[in-house]
Image (spheres, rainbow, N blue to C red):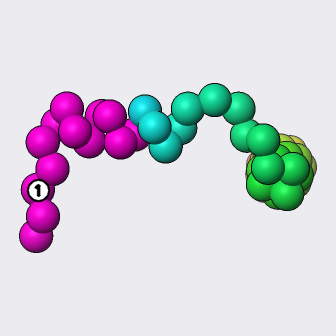
């Protein structure tokens, strides 16, 4: 197992997640996932409320 010092790991993370997403395909995919998650959440809440109302 390779161990990386904490400050080295933080530096790698800063380089990895620096700035906005410039790749349009990744941005589009992320937006799609966010919208599908929101829609799924609304449907799940509605289903639970319907089950609660029935029982």
Q: Quadrant of the C terminus?
A: bottom right
In this picture, which residue range is highlighted in magenta? 1-13
Q: Please, what is the dominant secondary structure of the magenta stretch?
A: helix
Q: Does the stretch in magenta take in 10?
A: yes
Q: Name the residue at the bottom extreme.
A: 1
Q: Nearer the viewer, residue 22 or 32?
A: 22
Q: Is residue 44 visible?
A: no
Q: Residue at x 22, y 39 (%)?
A: 8
> Quick check: 42 above or below 47?
above
Q: Which residue is mark 1?
A: 3
Q: Is 40 left or right of 12, judged from the image as shown?
A: right
Indicate the quadrant where residue 32 lies. Answer: bottom right
Indicate the quadrant where residue 1 lies. Answer: bottom left
Q: Residue at x 55, y 32 (%)?
A: 18
Q: Residue at x 32, y 34 (%)?
A: 11
Q: Position of residue 40 (x, y in %)?
A: 83, 54
Q: Position of residue 49 (x, y in %)?
A: 82, 45
Q: Nearer the viewer, residue 2 or 36?
A: 2
Q: Is 6 left or right of 53, judged from the image as shown?
A: left
Q: Residue at x 87, y 50 (%)?
A: 24
Q: Position of residue 2 (x, y in %)?
A: 12, 64
Around disc 1, counting alpha carbons within 10 Å, would you say few (fewer than 14), some (14 to 19), or many (20 or more)? few
């Amino acid at each position: 197992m390779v161990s990386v010092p904490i400050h080295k790991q933080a530096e790698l993370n800063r380089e990895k997640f620096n700035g906005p997403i410039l790749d349009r395909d990744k941005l589009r995919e992320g937006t799609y996932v966010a919208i599908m998650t929101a829609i799924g959440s609304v449907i799940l809440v509605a289903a639970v409320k319907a089950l609660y109302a029935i029982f």
